[in-house]
Amino acid sequence: MNKAEHRNLCRSVGGMLRAVVGAALCVASAASAQVAVKAGTLHTMEGEPITDALVLIGEGGQIDYVGKASERAIPEGYTTHECAVATPGLVDVRSTLGFTGLYNVDADQDQLDDSARLQPGLRAIDAYNPRDRLIGYSRSFGVTTVHTGHGPGELISGQTMIAKTRGDTVEDAAFVPAKAVAATLGPRAHKGGGKSPGSRAKAMEMLRAELLKAQAHGAKIARAESDPETEGPSRDLAMESLVSVLNRETPLIIAADRAQDIANAMRLADEFGFTLWLESAAESYLLADQLKERGTPVLLHPTMARSWGERASLSYNTAKVLKDAGVPFAIESGYEGYVPKVRVVLFEAAAAAGYGELGFGDALAAVTIEAAKILGVDGRVGSIAVGKDGDIAMYNADPFEYTTHCVGVLIEGDHFAGEREFDIGYP
């Protein structure tokens, strides 16, 4: 191997995945969809709701028409679905779906490896199980896109990906195979029995040390790229992942609930200059002004998360506080250490809309277009517009009402059962 080839191999994981994995994990082309959706009320998230609405999805799985049903005839040969209310397919901004399995046994729990405190080289695509029944269960309530990956619990637990909730292989499901690196600050990352880290100061020291190593590794790569005679560093998957973070190619998601840990996360981002996304962030309402000033997005804990431990001071109103302060946020299904482990964002948004006083429109946005914007995929999903993917959730009434049912889901025009028809598959 010559030096030029060696330099190419030592590029950051972001570039590597775009060059090597991205091509292999492109979204499978949609079947010839040709589907029509007629809805009494259509929430496009592109403007005001449309009544007596029609959506046409063409052969490529993209939306060809959005508007009044009276203004456009359904072409011959289209399959037609009718519902009372339709919304964009829901976007779960942070989850461990596909890593956390339906049966809650060791064999289907791949969301966290606790053999080491710092594991940025763990790829999400290597652990995601597209056939797990929990994916179909979540889809049956309208979730069509999920940002998923290694969960909180270690200082750096691994990488994340974005997938559609369909497909039998990771190639079918993934359309962003490497999106972010997941980290944790606070008691969840602390280890007992004399193991590190045992305190906040130790956790921050360990993270800083790892990021400093990544800076040095990135500098070696840069020198080798600028000088053909300079030998580049040896391959190091963990360092390559963090170089991508330091180059702002990949966000670092830091799960932190207490204000003290959120402040530490912001200070770390200032020190190293990476793109910070806050996850869970139960006490983010205490730092709303700082988050607004920084433009730091919050992947907010489920509204109905259990309020104990680090989340003892969570509030149903946090979503509204962040919205009113101008902080970019979306509501996650998240991860918790015991059943149900992964929640359904439809219900969490409904609780934020009502008990949390966020209101219908902003709550729906928090699990559709705002989630898509944070993830950088709003050109494809998150709203119903011409040219976007034909991902639609269909309901028999207001989707946030307890008695409402999801009656069907479309992903790029492909039809999937709603909650009443979905077979959970328990033995």
Image: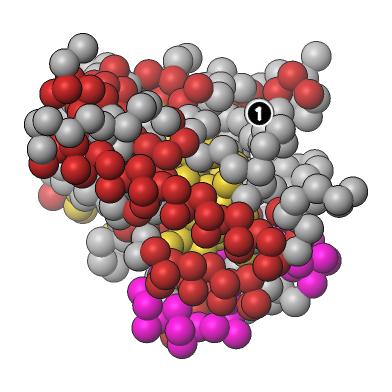
Identity of the residue drawn at 37% across and 31% down: 177
Q: With respect to residue 76, does 194 lie above or below?
A: below
Rendering quarter of residue 98: top right
Quadrant containing the C terminus is top right
Q: Is residue 294 magenta?
A: yes
Q: In the image, residue 93 lies at what x, y percent?
A: 47, 51
For residue 121, say whether it is visible.
yes
- Apparent side of residue 132 relative to residue 398 in the rendered image (left or right): right
Residue 169 appears left or right of 37: right
Q: Is residue 325 above or below residue 125?
A: below
Q: Residue at x 75, y 77 (%)?
A: 313
- Residue 278 as seen in the image, left or right of residue 304: left
Q: Is residue 385 magenta?
A: no
The residues colored magenta run 284-312
Residue 252 is situated, as x and y percent measured from the top left of the image, at 45, 54
Residue 238 image position (x, y, % from top left): 47, 36
For this orientation, the residue located farthest to the right is 193
User: According to the image, label 1 marks what residue?
Assistant: 110
Secondary structure of the residue carrying tag 1 is loop
Image-quadrant location for residue 37 = top left
Q: Is residue 145 visible?
A: no
274, 125: nearer the viewer: 274
Q: Residue at x 42, y 39 (%)?
A: 239
Residue type at mark 1? Asp
**Whole-percent x, y for residue 42 in the image:** 34, 54
* In the image, residue 316 above or below residue 205: below
> Could you tell me which residue is drawn at 13 percent across and 49 percent down?
71
Near-viewer residue (330 or 197) = 197
